[in-house]
Amino acid sequence: MIDVEEAYRVLFEYVTPGPVVALPLSDALYRTLASPINCDLDMPPFDRSVMDGYAVRAVDVTQAPLTLRLVGEAPAGAVVGKAIGDGEAMRINTGAPIPPGADAVVRVEETEPCGDGVLVKSSVAVGNFITRRGAYVTAGDVVMAAGLRLTPAAIAAAATAGAARVSVYRKPRVAILTTGDELVDVDQKPLGAQIRNSNQFLVEALVRSAHADPVVLPVVRDDRDRLEASIREGLKADVLCVTGGVSMGDRDFVPEVLQAAGATFHIHKIAIKPGRPTIFATTPSGTLVFALPGNPVSALVGFELLVRPALRVREGGGAIQPVLLAAEVVGGCPATRDRQSYHPARAWVGARGQWCVERVSWGGSGDSLGLAAANAMIVCPPGAPEVPEGAQGFIMLLDPV
Ligand code: AMP
Ligand code: MG
């Protein structure tokens, strides 16, 4: 059994970024850039107005208030050929090119219509409300470095730079295999000793939330031969995520079948509660394998602890452990024994902007219904004393929004 720090050292040693693909920009949301993006033009590409107003020569309005002759307009998207001369102004809109001869913009708010002309009420400095060509970047500059995650704002920047296709790390395909004689489908009524297969939905949803592609395999019984066939199928994906059958029961065949299928174990048992029997392995062809205990909370903890960070590395996003935030623990939290403990909890932002958290009422690691109210886990390190009411603890957010 290894501790959490050691588990991350091992995980990040064996997980590396996946293959690179070129994608149309609109398919690349939340992918990570594998190569930098250069802007193919100066930005802005021309001297342009920051405001709706009038393009003027600053020297003409030093004695403001005064009236200028109106000599046309400069709308956005049009190149104005005509220059403005002594005592002239041109109506201009936000984002429009500055007409030749003008060197400043007066905001509409500083003017009043006046016959055929415009009354300018205050003087302006040269360059007022003008963004010069190339003020942001020069053609050829790197505007987005490799390793940048394509958020909506980054997608917009790539569009500005003319990157119709982008080179990114491919979305990992994650095979999901749930195991257990007791499992029935969501649309079945469990009989006798049966329960519904919630882990299939849990892991599929987690994989999607990590911006990876789930491939759900048919549930498999606790039967060595059938399990082996399913695991071999699952190993064709980039990542295989198995739940159930990893513990000490006489029908927990997952570890031996994984080994028979060629997987090398790097982690087998972590000092966490719940989730101790968690396995991380790799195959010679490079598939990452995670085998998580069947209890829904154990499976969730194992996913957040290992699978999500591993997917992030595969997606080119770097090796990052789950972020722990300090929070005020309402109702306190019990002392921790030898294993790092995870308590399903509800987190919210308190009146002073601080994180607050309270354990959800929950029947233990088999209770997937109680888990529904949790948007965080309180994380208690091994040997931690009881956290008194209102004292500081640490949380891992499950739902970042
Ligand atoms: P196991 O890890 O196979 O020993 O399973 C531990 C506990 O988790 C048992 O109570 C199982 O019934 C439950 N369990 C296993 N797989 C699932 C699943 N796919 N969905 C919901 N509960 C499960
Ligand atoms: Mg089982």
Image (cartoon, helix red, strand yellow):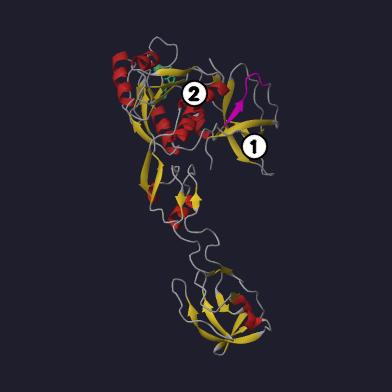
Kindly identify the amino acid type of the residue bearing the numbered disc 1: Cys
Front-most of residues 278 and 296: 278
Q: Nearer the viewer, residue 142 or 365?
A: 142
> Does the beta carbon of the residue at mark 2 sit less than 8 Å from ligand 1?
yes
Residue 267: horizontal and vertical position, in percent?
A: 48, 19
Is residue 367 in view?
no
Q: Is residue 23 left or right of residue 96?
A: left
Asked if the stretch drawn in magenta spans residue 381, the answer is: yes
Instruction: Work out whether mark 2 precedes mark 1 in sequence or the reverse, and give the earlier one.
Output: 2
Under tag 1, what secondary structure? strand
Report the residue at 55% width, 85% height from top: 85
Q: Is residue 144 above or below residue 253?
A: below
Mark 2 Cα-neighbour bin, 10 Å: few <14, some 14–19, many ≥20: many
Mark 2 = which residue? 298
Residue extent of the magenta highlight:
377-384
Q: Can you tell which mark lies on residue 99?
A: none
Decide whether residue 364 is among the magenta residues: no
Mark 1 burial class by Cα count in 10 Å: few <14, some 14-19, many 20+ = many
Say above or below: 293 vs 77.
above
For this view, does 299 lie left or right of residue 235?
Answer: right
**Residue 5, placed above or below residue 111:** above
Q: Marks 1 and 2: in contact by CB < 8 Å?
A: no
Ligand 1 is found in the corner quadrant, namely: top left
Element under disc 2: helix
**Residue that appears at 33% across and 26% down:** 234
Give the farthest residue toward the top.
250
Distance CA(mark 2)–CA(mark 1): 24 Å
